[in-house]
Amino acid sequence: MKYRKIAFIGSGNIVNAMVSGIVKYGKYKSSMITISSPNNCRRNKIVENYNVIGINDNNIAVKNSDVIILAVKPQVMEYVCKSLRKIVDYRKKLILTLAAGITVNRYNEYFDDKINLIRIMPSILSFIGKGIIGIFTQNIITEENKIFIEKLMKSIGDIIWCKEEHEINNITAISGSSPAYIFLFMEAIQQKAEELGYNKKISRKLIFNIFNSSLKFASFQKDICFSELRKKVMSEGGVTEKALNEFYNGSFKQIIGKIMQNVIDKSKEMENKF
Ligand SMILES: NC(=O)c1ccc[n+]([C@@H]2O[C@H](COP(=O)([O-])OP(=O)(O)OC[C@H]3O[C@@H](n4cnc5c(N)ncnc54)[C@H](OP(=O)(O)O)[C@@H]3O)[C@@H](O)[C@H]2O)c1
């Protein structure tokens, strides 16, 4: 890949995950990556771990980079973008944003210019190079930029191009937020295991075994749908059936559908707010 200077604005959870994936799995030159954020603490950790450059001045980071990745919370995005207005010719830069719930048009207002913006929706699984990344742009993108972005994003997972901007909200619900649903499920099983007397270490080991092996089992039988796999664990009138009835009574699938819809609705609500 032809290396370009990348500046991350923000040094939070998702930047830590992306830098890990890009440097470790994408073998991107760490000397080409700058992280800019106000407080030393989290930034320094990323700098130490991945040997990237750290600074506390967004203007300098932007001026010295070819690619800018906006990675602050949606609540501070307007402030951050407005403070970066007009400091460089953004037509010569590629700007990526990770924020949920802020539309491309809004960034044009923030920057007071029609900028070369691409929305991407990664997940925390970028950390191990195994995320799913939604990508959307309104602009016509040059072949060179397209190749660059695809290569960069493929180092942190599988990519999905979104044709319409609202699809980014769907990707947020399906893969951006979903590691949190899975971790909550793991947490709940571990909690009960501990209540049953297994200590933290053992119950954690059990959870890892269950999730790893269930995934392996499912991937060995890729032609069998999940509901069929579930039936293989149950016998009629047995204990697992009784357990799962509790899920049905509590409308488990509806709850999952509802929480995913909540992510989409919240993203839309934010689109009107920011
Ligand atoms: N977490 C995820 O899994 C995930 C997935 C997809 C998309 N996203 C999106 O990514 C963005 C960041 O999320 P996050 O989870 O990484 O949040 P986070 O952990 O709270 O990180 C936010 C970062 O923004 C920095 N920041 C605040 N004000 C700044 C400023 N004026 N200039 C530069 N940096 C500033 C903070 O700096 P300090 O540390 O110095 O205070 C912090 O490092 C959000 O818009 C979110 O929607 C997150």
Image (tube, rainbow, N blue to C red):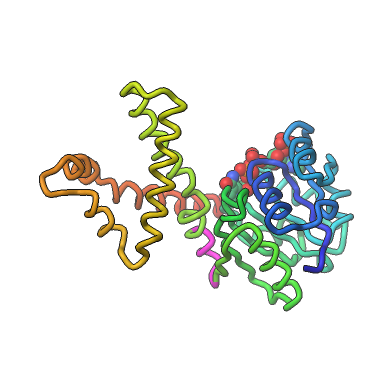
Task: Measuring from the top left, give residue 100's x and y in whole percent.
Answer: 58, 52
Task: Measuring from the top left, give residue 230's x and y in whole percent.
Answer: 26, 53
Residue at the spot x=12%, y=49% of the render? 236
| Rendered-image quadrant of the N terminus | bottom right
Part of the protein shown in magenta? 163-169
Task: Measuring from the top left, give residue 179's x and y in whole percent.
Answer: 49, 47
Q: Is residue 28 left or right of residue 195?
A: right
Residue at the spot x=53%, y=52% of the render? 176
Front-lying residue, 107 or 66: 66
Q: Quadrant of residue 184?
A: top left
Q: Quadrant of residue 202?
A: top left
Residue at the spot x=74%, y=57% of the render? 27
Quick check: can you spot residue 106? Answer: yes
Residue at the spot x=75%, y=48% of the render? 9
Vertical placement of 138 versus 177: above or below? Answer: below
Q: Is residue 60 left or right of residue 45?
A: right
> Does the magenta-highlighted stretch encompass residue 232?
no
Task: Measuring from the top left, give residue 67's x and y in whole percent.
Answer: 78, 60
Image label count: 0
List the single residue furthest toward the left: 237
Quick check: can you spot residue 73? Answer: no
Vertical placement of 59 versus 190: above or below? Answer: below
> Does the magenta-highlighted stretch encompass residue 167?
yes
**The quarter of the picture showing ligand 1:** top right
Q: Is residue 2 left or right of residue 24?
A: right
